[in-house]
Amino acid sequence: MPNRTTDFRSDNVATVSPEILQALGRANIGPAAAYGDDEYSRELDRRFSALFETEVKVFPVSTGTAANALALAACARPYGGIYCHEVAHIHTSEGGATEMFTGGTKLIPLPGDGFRLQAQLLAETLAQAGIGQRHKPQPDAISVTQATEHGTCYSLDELHVIAELARGNRLRLHMDGARFANALATLDCTPAAMTSRIGVDILSFGATKNGCMNTEAIVVFDQSLIEGLSYRLRRAGQTWSKMRYAAVQLLAYVEDDLYLRSARRANALAKRLEAGLAGLSQARLVAPVQADLVFVELPEPAIAALAAEGFLFHRRSPTRIRLVTHFDGTDEEVEQFLAAARRHLN
Amino acid sequence: MPNRTTDFRSDNVATVSPEILQALGRANIGPAAAYGDDEYSRELDRRFSALFETEVKVFPVSTGTAANALALAACARPYGGIYCHEVAHIHTSEGGATEMFTGGTKLIPLPGDGFRLQAQLLAETLAQAGIGQRHKPQPDAISVTQATEHGTCYSLDELHVIAELARGNRLRLHMDGARFANALATLDCTPAAMTSRIGVDILSFGATKNGCMNTEAIVVFDQSLIEGLSYRLRRAGQTWSKMRYAAVQLLAYVEDDLYLRSARRANALAKRLEAGLAGLSQARLVAPVQADLVFVELPEPAIAALAAEGFLFHRRSPTRIRLVTHFDGTDEEVEQFLAAARRHLN
Amino acid sequence: MPNRTTDFRSDNVATVSPEILQALGRANIGPAAAYGDDEYSRELDRRFSALFETEVKVFPVSTGTAANALALAACARPYGGIYCHEVAHIHTSEGGATEMFTGGTKLIPLPGDGFRLQAQLLAETLAQAGIGQRHKPQPDAISVTQATEHGTCYSLDELHVIAELARGNRLRLHMDGARFANALATLDCTPAAMTSRIGVDILSFGATKNGCMNTEAIVVFDQSLIEGLSYRLRRAGQTWSKMRYAAVQLLAYVEDDLYLRSARRANALAKRLEAGLAGLSQARLVAPVQADLVFVELPEPAIAALAAEGFLFHRRSPTRIRLVTHFDGTDEEVEQFLAAARRHLN
Amino acid sequence: MPNRTTDFRSDNVATVSPEILQALGRANIGPAAAYGDDEYSRELDRRFSALFETEVKVFPVSTGTAANALALAACARPYGGIYCHEVAHIHTSEGGATEMFTGGTKLIPLPGDGFRLQAQLLAETLAQAGIGQRHKPQPDAISVTQATEHGTCYSLDELHVIAELARGNRLRLHMDGARFANALATLDCTPAAMTSRIGVDILSFGATKNGCMNTEAIVVFDQSLIEGLSYRLRRAGQTWSKMRYAAVQLLAYVEDDLYLRSARRANALAKRLEAGLAGLSQARLVAPVQADLVFVELPEPAIAALAAEGFLFHRRSPTRIRLVTHFDGTDEEVEQFLAAARRHLN
């Protein structure tokens, strides 16, 4: 039997880190300039510039969908094309946000093993994109998700090759980092190594799933994108008046590597699920677990039995479920789930 | 000399009410369903339905701009027209958000004394709108701001006449309630009296300026608008995953009339400014003070001197300034400002 | 050696039918009301209502892209989804027009043998579309192309099954009839049998490729779509002021079955190409020829040799070419091409 | 009593010039490359480059609305602002086309005597536009109409001052030349003098009202606008496949100054109306007649009597009518109208 609080549906079900909640209180003293002209927001730019080892501009926004769609709107023309994996969140799960904020730019989804874009297919597709042909979407950007929607990670080498391709074709490179910290924890590299050093132009920096309170950020590496984006954000209703409360969260999020510690915790829980499921003959892991997501094939009756016991998770097909861990989950929950799975798989 | 914390630039510079900050902590226990499927969000619908004395649906959003533009997008066709006052925030200060989210609906600004739409001019304009003429924007909605951007309020009778006009012309009535609580405090009526009983179809319910943390809400009275709006919000990146933290703020905001108490406090500070300025022969109040906004004409040298002393406010012309009070301001600040004003007006 | 005038690149390279050119002159007498309020435009509605055996509204437009995109904009919500074949012109070749005019509706491309949508896959896809899920495009319309972009035709039975599916799922059914007459000639049925009797809601009625002068039409069967579309057309710059010159073309186009005679002529030339190529062992026809389009696989050197001789056609891959016939082509041209092909295939 | 063919409602009611109709026939020989890759289209660029005394790119489009909205979409960012006169056709009569094609750019209407933008007010407005303020539309373009919607013309000096203002503020200058030829005939200058020499960046070149068949053109002076515009046109359904039939019309339109001769004819008829009406004590001309438009104030009973007799014209208010002449009108029609007016004004 699961705890009352066991919930593998999403990392969105998690709470807010106590450190982040406390930071809100610390910022709640006296008036401050609105719309990001405050001290915390300025500190945020400085802090993240240090983190990414290059000058960046940080725009806090309210959701990952807003981060992705507006980042891409800054990169692509209405008659442009954006290349992404066919399971990319921007293509499958954001209600057409990118189409709306770009003014109708075309998303061009590609297959790819491991739920990652494959550089060779991408290169071939770009070669036949019809540059200069008015009836074809003109390539403007590539969007990679790190970690992917299925919990796999691009290696730094893979990212490097894709970034080269972007540069060679004069495309912008966007990274959907809804689970940026989880990938960072897995690759065990610096934030700069995964972004600025490689050639990412603009990053959706995820924070909500990993302990912030409805606060994400767009981190802009390519300075030429900043001005246009600042207008698009205001126009999108994404320029908070009391911006300091977003800034202070993001500052607390990276302070003392809180974000990494939280991501490592969630990843470890997922690895524990993976290890346990790997030992079950009737379970088949869909992909290696490199973040906080576990996709597993199970017999339909076992899935039904686990759900009947009260375990919460999403079904992706009659025989495939998604389990998501989060920083505030427990080893006990994972063990209970594994014990139940063992039981139902006889 | 002003306090270090005196700031009349906007009510956006205010802090978050302690009660609201505490409520965040109370909600921070264990996992909860994402995207508004949690208990706090359901309670929010119930609580606001009681408050407005009719069944309403509440959609928390991140900014007033998002609230306004998405509420209007639910009401207007791309080839429609939205009637508003020429100083309406949606027309002058939201970066074209309404134009974007509606797909290019035309805002039709009208003059009007006291910064309020005048029913007669509105009626005449609608009569000549060119219904059925394909080259003319087809009337879809009227947007009123209560309290207005200049701190005046529509009387209930004025609202009633405009609502009749909307009904008679089959238009939706939207209320921009960025300062809803301030108007309510001034009119001393119930929320229902100012909205549902009159015929408001959809309300931008302001909360951030009056003590919430970057949280506003769209309150939908017309049930037929709900479904479409729910998709538009998701697509706009305005569906928070950890919605409970917005819901719990809004619940705390109306609990024990906190929102009214805060608004009354801000209004009282503004009335105190008004009373003090009214006694100065060289000062001319631009409009009666019915909310937390004071617009006053002063000699240019006096404005310069007040600014030089460190008082913070916005200039609207060389001889006109805007002073905005907020719930966490003090009588002392106001008195210091008035004393300085007296000094500089000899 | 081809004639100076041999051109298999497209049916767009054709001239205008003499009958249509003459009709322009007949309408060129005295003033007439603008924007479609003239007698010819009214006659057009009557004539096409007779042709389609039900009351229709006809909106002449300047291109097939405008016809498709605006017809679909009348059918789909910005957060909706439109199902089409993966080679559909609206998806591959219209520069994102549908995305623009709809405000970002998602095109959902599906594979299908014979370049036709397969009802079963369509049904399965719709069953998993996520109705009511805010992050998923909500099914709004199905678009079929008749004849398809590869010169195949849906049978009436196939269309009937898809129309049932549309009705059962409350979707609109759009037909891209850029080559409507060619399909009609092949199926040898009435216009009504292929549209109104089956349940097509809105039709892009192609005319330019088959003898008109830059004039296509949207034919609306579902009366509820008319009003909104009329505004969208004006807004799109698609409401011609001198509409009579478009109406008179379309009247001449269907008079004495000119459109069918022209389509039969083009189809016959394509069938002649098909028959000739079928006899060549190194040639492989990609699809049965049911309109004016012939796709054929040839050895790369043969393609090069044919091009070098001056034959004009489009290459779709190193070993695949597209040959398009048109109403004003000649048997001689076809025979010259076949003779050359025989020579180069030794 | 008016002739059966008297019609002062619009210059849109006119026929097509015989020379233009004949040119269509001359081009109707054999196949030609589609989408503007034909010889006539190339000749059009050459011919207009000579006409405007600088290298221009010409894009034929189907309506003036398409010309204006797409030209402006090439000039303005979605978060930009376009300055125009408050009676500008783009603002009052195009169904929101500019808002749609730009993605929601704000039109900023200004008053101005003689229905012309006044440079001084424009300069003052620009000075207060809030450059760099994210909540304000950022100035991107100025649009002037020459001749204006009320039949007045900017002098070359007036245009020059506005063009200077555009340059000084780094804005694009668009000219809505729906009645370009009428203005040219009145100013008696070269096309270059009114455009390229002054600094017009992009021109909506009207042709339909003055004898073409539903064919207008965008003439691009600023080479940097061409590429983006070419994609936008394709996407808007404004790239005709049989482009040669548009090109050949525009070539015939300027050959032997046909366009000027037609415009002079229409203007002369309007001047004759003006002269006749000026002699009537109860008639008041609203503006000097400098094109083919006459706005006149008349007693309501006289207007009713003229309409009752069968004269066709538009009423702009109970006491104001608009009379529009056209190249294929007659002196006799004008005299009949004036005689009737004299009768009814006793």
Image (spheres, coloured by chain):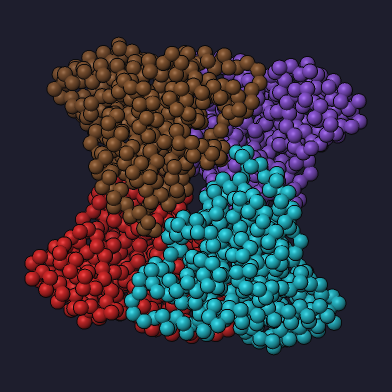
Chain colours: A cyan, B red, C purple, D brown
Q: Quadrant of the N terminus of chain A?
A: bottom right
The answer to whether one can see residue D67 in this image is no
Q: With A265 as the anchor, is D200 left or right in this view? A: left
Q: Residue furthest bottom?
A: A332
The residue lying at 50 percent from left, 59 percent from top is A223
Splitting the image into 4 quarters, where does residue D64 fall? Answer: top left
Could you say which is closer to the camera, residue C341 or residue C242? C341
The answer to whether one can see residue A80 in this image is yes
Could you say which is closer to the camera, residue C280 or residue B183? C280
The residue lying at 63 percent from left, 86 percent from top is A4
Asked if residue B4 is positioned above or below residue C196 in the image, the reply reads: below
Could you say which is closer to the camera, residue D289 or residue D116? D116
Q: Quadrant of the C terminus of chain A?
A: bottom right
The residue lying at 28 percent from left, 48 percent from top is D125
Asked if residue A259 is positioned above or below residue C262 in the image, the reply reads: below
Q: Position of residue C45 (x, y in %)?
A: 53, 29
The residue lying at 36 percent from left, 22 percent from top is D190
Q: With A32 as the anchor, is D221 left or right in this view? A: right
Q: Position of residue C298 (x, y in %)?
A: 84, 33
Asked if residue A156 is positioned above or below residue D217 in the image, the reply reads: below
